[in-house]
Image: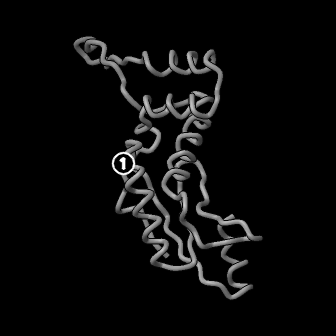
Amino acid sequence: MLRIISERTLEIDEELSVCFIDWQKAFDRVNWTKLMQIIKETGIDWRERRLISNLYMVQSVKVRLNRGETRSVKIGRGVRQGCCLSPVLFNLYSECLTKEALEGFGDFKIGGQIIHTVKYADDLVVLAKEEKVLRDMTDKVIEIGRCYGMEMNVEKTNVM
């Protein structure tokens, strides 16, 4: 998708500034309270919310050592590895984060539609015509990301 967008901007001789944001341990940082709030605001029925809550909110873990197991410790955040629901929940969480952060921003259009981001799994690409707009958008995504429990990985985040 990003290649197509890049080729299109070259064809019509437009500028394109891009920021590739990498979240540190993105799937492990999903805040359950925030996720449940998002699920409720999305209009998901209370029965499905209760099921998701039971799957996530009551998780605990024990670590097996040579001398036995540790006591049970509650897990407080993150989506379950290997659960078929986890990618859907993470995408919903990520979409709400970027939507909240980028509302009112954006100057890059394709077919008259403002395009803020391109996403794949936990990868996020922020798009803008002007560098200053991109900088403002990226700062806002990072700020709102912190409210969602996310932290940017500085070493893996790039601007082009």
Give me the residue at 42% from left, 37% from top.
28
Residue 76 left/right relative to 8: left
Crowd band around label 1 with a 10 angstrom C-alpha radius: few (<14), some (14–19), many (20+): few
Q: Is residue 59 above or below residue 137?
A: above
Residue 158 coordinates in the image, percent (x, y):
44, 68
Give me the residue at 59% from left, 73% from top.
107
Give me the residue at 57% from left, 47% from top.
95
- The one nearer the camera, 133 or 18, is 133
Residue 44 coordinates in the image, percent (x, y):
64, 26
Q: Is residue 92 above or below residue 107?
A: above
- The one nearer the camera, 37 or 159, is 37
The image quadrant of residue 30 is top left
Give me the residue at 45% from left, 77% from top.
132
Furthest-left residue in this view: 67
- The one nearer the camera, 141 or 89, is 141
- How many marks the image carries: the answer is 1
Residue 148 coordinates in the image, percent (x, y):
41, 43
Furthest-bottom residue in this view: 13
Residue 78 coordinates in the image, percent (x, y):
44, 33
Residue 24 left/right relative to 85: left
Quadrant occupied by the N terminus: bottom right
The image quadrant of residue 157 is bottom left
Question: What residue is shown with label 1?
Answer: 146
Q: Is residue 57 above or below residue 116?
A: above
